[in-house]
């Protein structure tokens, strides 16, 4: 549960922009790690923000997050990211 006024920031490996071979290599690299690597679609990552208001620009490839502040992205970062804000009491 999150308290009203809380923020949730997520960046996640983007399955939508990842080849199946790159996804396989990432999973293999994390096979012995304490946390596995799971690429998810933008829709699947968006589900983590259920019930939260999204901070602009929403859930996007992190290379495009606030580009006016950091300059033009060199290309896709292969990570989707966003920030959700809880405005109302209750779940989540």
Image: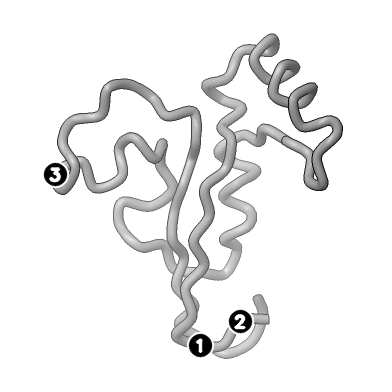
- Residue, x 61% and y 34% (percent of image)? 41
Does residue 21 appear left or right of residue 80 in this picture?
Answer: right
How far apart in space, not on screen, are marks 1 and 2 (Cα)? Answer: 7 Å
- Residue, x 49% and y 28% (percent of image)? 78
> Where residue 10 sits: x, y (%)?
53, 55
Secondary structure type for disc 3: helix
Residue topped by disc 1: 4
- Circle on res. 2: 2
- Quick one: quadrant of the C terminus? bottom right
Image height of 28 relative to 9, above or below: above
Secondary structure type for disc 2: loop
- Residue, x 40% and y 41% (percent of image)? 60
Front label number (3 vs 1): 3
> Where residue 38 sits: x, y (%)?
73, 35
- Quick one: quadrant of the N terminus? bottom right
Dot 2, crowdedness within 10 Å: few (<14), some or many (≥20)? Answer: some
> Where residue 79 sits: x, y (%)?
49, 36
> Where residue 26 sits: x, y (%)?
69, 24
- Circle on res. 68: 3
CB atoms of marks 1 and 2 within 8 Å? yes
- Residue, x 61% and y 27% (percent of image)? 15
Residues 79 and 41: in front is 79
Dot 3, crowdedness within 10 Å: few (<14), some or many (≥20)? Answer: few
Secondary structure type for disc 1: loop
The mark nearer the N terminus, 3 or 2, is 2
């Amino acid at each position: 549960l999150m308290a009203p006024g809380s923020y949730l920031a997520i960046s996640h490996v983007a399955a939508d922009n990842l080849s199946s071979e790159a996804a396989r290599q990432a999973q293999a690299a994390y096979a012995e790690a304490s946390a596995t690597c799971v690429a998810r679609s933008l829709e699947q990552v968006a589900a983590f923000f259920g019930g939260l208001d999204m901070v602009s620009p929403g859930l996007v490839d992190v290379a495009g997050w606030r580009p006016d502040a950091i300059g033009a992205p060199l290309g896709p970062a292969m990570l989707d990211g966003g920030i959700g804000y809880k405005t109302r009491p209750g779940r989540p």
